Image (spheres, grey):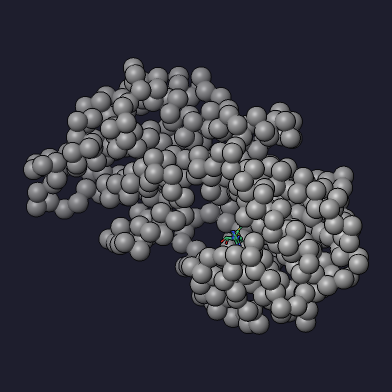
Amino acid sequence: MSRAPETRDRPRGSFRPKAHGKPVGLPPIPGLAARRAATDLIGRVLDGGRPLDLELDTMAAQGAFRGLEPRDRALVRALVGTTLRRLGQIDHALSRLIDKPLPEKAARARAILRIGAAQLLFMDVPDHAAVSLAVDLAGEDRLGRPWKGLINGVLRGLARRRDEILESQDPERLNTPDWLLRRWIVNYGAERAQAIATMHAAEPTLDLSVKGDPAGWAERLDGTVLPTGTVRRTAGGAVEQLDGFEDGEWWVQDAAAALPARLIGDVAGRRVADLCAAPGGKTAALALAGAKVTAVDISAERLKRLDQNLARLKLAGVETVVADLTGWDPAEPYDAVLLDAPCSATGTIRRHPDVAYLKDEADIAVLAATQAAILGRAADWVKPGGVLVYCTCSLEPEEGEAQIAAFLAAHPEYRRRPIEAQEIGGLAECITANGDMRTLPCHLAAEDLRLGGLDGFFAARLMRVA
Ligand SMILES: C[S@@+](CC[C@H](N)C(=O)[O-])C[C@H]1O[C@@H](n2cnc3c(N)ncnc32)[C@H](O)[C@@H]1O
């Protein structure tokens, strides 16, 4: 079992005297603040049902990370990421050591146990540090204090029985909610479903769309150039500190997410509507290729991020519109429309492991209805002879293949223009029999798990013929 790197350890035998669970007049315990932040985040995501990215932004805005060194912030992300990626295994392991399920009121203790178990099972943290930091954390407040003894006993037991427990586990099955695994088996077969789940356990790569000179940037950033032109590095370090970030030479975008915008073809000087545009990964590609882009999104906040991203990239010629696309209409039709519709995002679980726990099967029908509504309206916004590209970062056919089948049946003025493998870096395995693009997290496999894979995306290219 591979163990991800971790940063710091706690000096032995220090900081005992406490009043009301808090150290008195002593320096903070190294590593404790990172565990506290990670435990807070896990509680907010898994008990509060809040998206991790949103909570990270909120906590940063509230100053929760103030005083944390960059490497401790990276540790927070690693703790939370590992806990979410391996949640099924962690909960299974904990259940082997706890006689009966913890009550509702033990939510804080459960979060502490999960963060502690992630370190013991999957991270390169000395056992004694993982256990004592968890116990210290529990002692900090009235919610955790009653469970200190249990946390200590359970985590010590886990450290002792780690190998036996890990050997008994089926990671792919445990770490994938049943409804998702069942769907992927139906839609992609058991072997592929297993391969998708395997990819979800690995830390995702850092993928960059570069403005130019991919080989040069790959060399400067110690990465590799994928067949699609994306520069890929194994994650690590703060993105803002990497060469070229401040100068706006590249933006972060998964290799699969970089593909739909290019399916429109030559956009130089053409009017293109980028629908559901924020935070602007695809807008940037269109603007870079010389399009006159109208970027529409329902979220003013996210469009602000799009503006900031474009400013950093020094890309101009983009008009932004805050609007709900189920009610908006443009003044005149466009040469091309790209619709990156809101979806379940089950194709991005590798990057956003919280998605597996925040979404459920009922969401898919609701989202599919919104996608159909926006796609149906967008049909009128393309000039005859123009192109409409529809995409989602979902693995669920209701949000991809089935949308296009229904759309083409209802819109005789459109025809599919099949996508060719050479348009997407020669990835023939990602072209469906109908000529759509279907990427899976297990595609683009590399010997080193940490360098392979890409987000699950669906894209179809339609031509307005009348
Ligand atoms: C998948 S994200 C878009 C990512 C973006 N295209 C990119 O490449 O960076 C989906 C976006 O749809 C927006 N959205 C959701 N419902 C919408 C609606 N009814 N009208 C307009 N935008 C909507 C969300 O605010 C979100 O920014």
> Which residue shows up at 10% across the image and 42% down it?
20
Q: Is residue 364 left or right of residue 466?
A: left
Q: Split into 4 quadrants, where in the image is the C terminus?
A: bottom right
Q: Which quadrant of the frame does ligand 1 lie within?
A: bottom right
Using the rendered image of the protein, determine whether residue 408 is visible from the camera's viewpoint: yes
Q: Is residue 352 left or right of residue 182?
A: left
Across and down, in percent, residue 77 comes to 42, 50
108 or 407, which lies in front? 407
Farthest front residue in view: 327
Question: Above or below — where is 151 with respect to 281?
Answer: above
Q: Quadrant of residue 150?
A: top left
Across and down, in percent, residue 148 comes to 22, 31
> Which residue shows up at 55% across the image and 79% down it?
311
Q: Quadrant of residue 178?
A: top right
Numbered disc total: 0
Across and down, in percent, residue 98 comes to 34, 21
Using the rendered image of the protein, determine whether residue 212 is visible from the camera's viewpoint: no
Question: Above or below — where is 377 with respect to 94?
Answer: below
Question: Above or below — where is 102 with respect to 363?
Answer: above
Q: Is residue 369 left or right of residue 94?
A: right
> Which residue shows up at 67% across the image and 48% down it?
368
183 or 216, which lies in front? 183
> Which residue shows up at 77% across the image and 82% down it?
269
Farthest top residue in view: 99
Across and down, in percent, residue 219 comes to 63, 65
355 or 68, which lies in front? 355
